[in-house]
Image (tube, grey):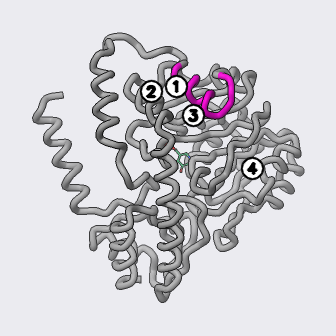
Amino acid sequence: MSRDVVAAMTAYTLELREAEIKLNQNEGPVDFPRELKDEILARIAERHWNIYPDFESMHLRGALAKVHGYETDNVLVGNGSNELLAAAVPTFVGPGTPVVYPKPSFALYEKLIAVAGGIALPIPVDPATGLLPLDAMLRAIERCDNAIVIVCSPNNPTGGVLPDGGVDALLATGATVLFDRAYGDFAEDSMPPLHDRLVTFSTFSKAWGLAGLRVGWLASTASTCREIRKVKLPYSLNIVSEAVAATALEHPEIRSRNVANTISERARVFEAMEKIEGVTPFPSRSNFIAFTTRRNAKDVFNDLHGRGILIRDICAAVPNALRVSIGTPSDNNAFLEALTSCA
Ligand SMILES: Cc1ncc(COP(=O)(O)O)c(C=O)c1O
């Protein structure tokens, strides 16, 4: 890339940043430490860029396995957890397979179910409870033969979680469970134990603040990982992404700090939102808060955008609702101030 192109892209990013406080995609608000970026890039410069990366991303899979007490065969990595979901759904879902999932949830699931020819069985979520509808999901599973469950806890975009013991209860039905814990760190949950019928998806995009690098991973038993690997594309991680993720794992304090800051800001922002007349925030264990407004939510969204604050319109998923990511304290203050004057 020429210097001109790099300069133009940098200028564009700076312009965007100046114009907007970006609280619409549940990214981490703090960039990866500059000195680690420099150190990794210097190492990457010494590598042969004309050579494919390792077919199996063994280094990163080994590093993830070590951190979590698994074997390398229990882990697959991909170009974001999106890529791994796109491989796992068709591994288990074929034409006519019943798939139970809470709705609203991450929109990608319905797309993947449709592409695989599965029968979508959405179970309505009440965002006000802060919980996912476990009992209704269990009843739906019992009515099917060989159901697949896709569940994200904390749920995007509502923020609620599975009740305690939820994953075990789902597994006890005999169903296969695709468990997306993209936001699990913010609920201070723990990785569930490995099981042949359980695939747990995690990402570096949220708590690690590395969304631009596109690294996700999944964990399951070696035999289940083997099945998913048959569907997944090879070489999906490039040498930069793999090196950054492996380096991040050597600095667990980055994730811990991001998580602690987000959890304390989430509590502060929630409390402040509750005090704004006409605003009703939903309980969240994630790095975002969904909320309804007394005024038309689309108008509130547009007014906030006019003030340089970009959040997410989720009216298509939850009536008259918006979703705001938890940002830095100053971005959160700017959001709260703007919301107070336009809600
Ligand atoms: C619930 C959920 N799962 C998965 C993803 C995708 O994450 P990644 O960046 O690892 O592809 C997202 C992204 O926002 C998400 O909200």
Locate the C terminus by quadrant. Answer: bottom left
Location of residue 84 (image quadrant): top right
In the rendered structure, the answer to whether residue 304 lies left or right of residue 97 reads: left
- Residue bearing mark 2: 242
Q: Position of residue 59 (x, y in %)?
A: 52, 20
Report, in whole angstroms, how far the alpha carbon at label 3 lies from the one at label 2. Answer: 11 Å
In front here: 29 or 304? Answer: 29
- On whether residue 215 falls in the magenta region, the answer is no
Amino acid at dot 2: Glu
- Which mark is first along the chain, 2 or 1? 1
Find the magenta span and give its range: 59-71
Residue 217, disc: 3
Residue 100, disc: 4
- Residue bearing mark 1: 60
Amino acid at dot 4: Val
Report, in whole angstroms, how far the alpha carbon at label 3 lies from the one at label 4. Answer: 23 Å
In front here: 162 or 35? Answer: 35
